[in-house]
Image (cartoon, grey):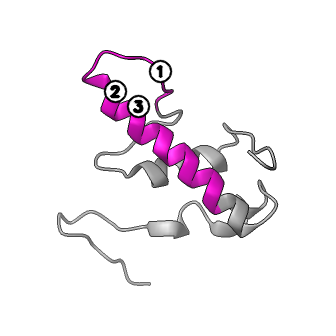
């Protein structure tokens, strides 16, 4: 098994962690997963943007974010951990 390394020597995991099949158990379809994760990633991104302004409108990451971890990866880990509930149509 080969390991792919990023520019800084860190191991790249991509969508393989958490496993896509585990994520799909928490939503009705792959399309629902994409929309759900994208909305949460946008909230996380807005949370980081508001920190400098002193506002507390958005909820930050519910899992411990890794260094330089993207908001979408954080959102997928939150979904995988069962910290978020998906409601159809929202």
Q: Quadrant of the N terminus?
A: bottom left
* Marks 3/1: CA–CA distance: 7 Å
- Disc 3 and disc 2 in contact, CB within 8 angstroms: yes
Q: Which element is circle 1 on?
A: loop
Q: Which region is colored magenta?
A: 34-60
Tags 2 and 1 in contact by the CB under 8 Å rule? Answer: yes
Q: Is residue 14 left or right of residue 78?
A: left
Q: CA distance from mark 2 to mark 1?
A: 8 Å
Reply yes or no: does residue 37 show up in magenta. Answer: yes
The structure residue drawn at horizontal position 70% and vertical position 42%, both measured from the top left corner, is 82
Identify the residue at image location x=65%, y=44%: 81
Task: Determine the secondary structure under disc 3.
Answer: helix
Nearest to N terminus: mark 2 or mark 1: 2
Q: Is residue 8 covered in magenta?
A: no
The answer to whether any part of residue 76 appears in the image is no
Q: Which residue is mark 2?
A: 50
Residue 15 point in image, percent of width and height: 52, 68
Q: Check disc 3 and report the residue beneath it.
A: 47
Name the residue at the front extreme: 89
User: In the picture shown, does residue 15 fall above or below 69?
Assistant: below
Q: Is residue 67 left or right of 75 when viewed as pictured?
A: left
Question: Dot 2: what SS?
Answer: helix
Q: Which mark is residue 57?
A: 1
What x and y, as percent, mark residue 7? Answer: 18, 69
Q: Residue at x 36, y 68 (%)?
A: 12
Q: Residues within 10 Å of mark 2 (few under 14, many from 20)?
A: some
- The total number of labels drawn is 3
For label 3, count other residues whose C-alpha is less than 10 Å away and answer few (under 14), some (14-19) or many (20+): some
């Amino acid at each position: 098994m080969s390991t792919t390394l990023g520019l800084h020597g860190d191991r790249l995991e991509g969508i393989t962690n958490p496993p896509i099949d585990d994520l799909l158990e928490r939503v009705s379809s792959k399309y629902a997963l994409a929309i759900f994760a994208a909305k949460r990633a946008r909230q996380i991104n807005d949370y980081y943007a508001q920190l400098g302004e002193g506002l507390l409108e958005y909820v930050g990451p519910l899992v411990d974010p890794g260094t330089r971890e993207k908001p979408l990866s954080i959102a997928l880990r939150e979904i995988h951990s069962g910290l978020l509930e998906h409601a159809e149509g929202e």
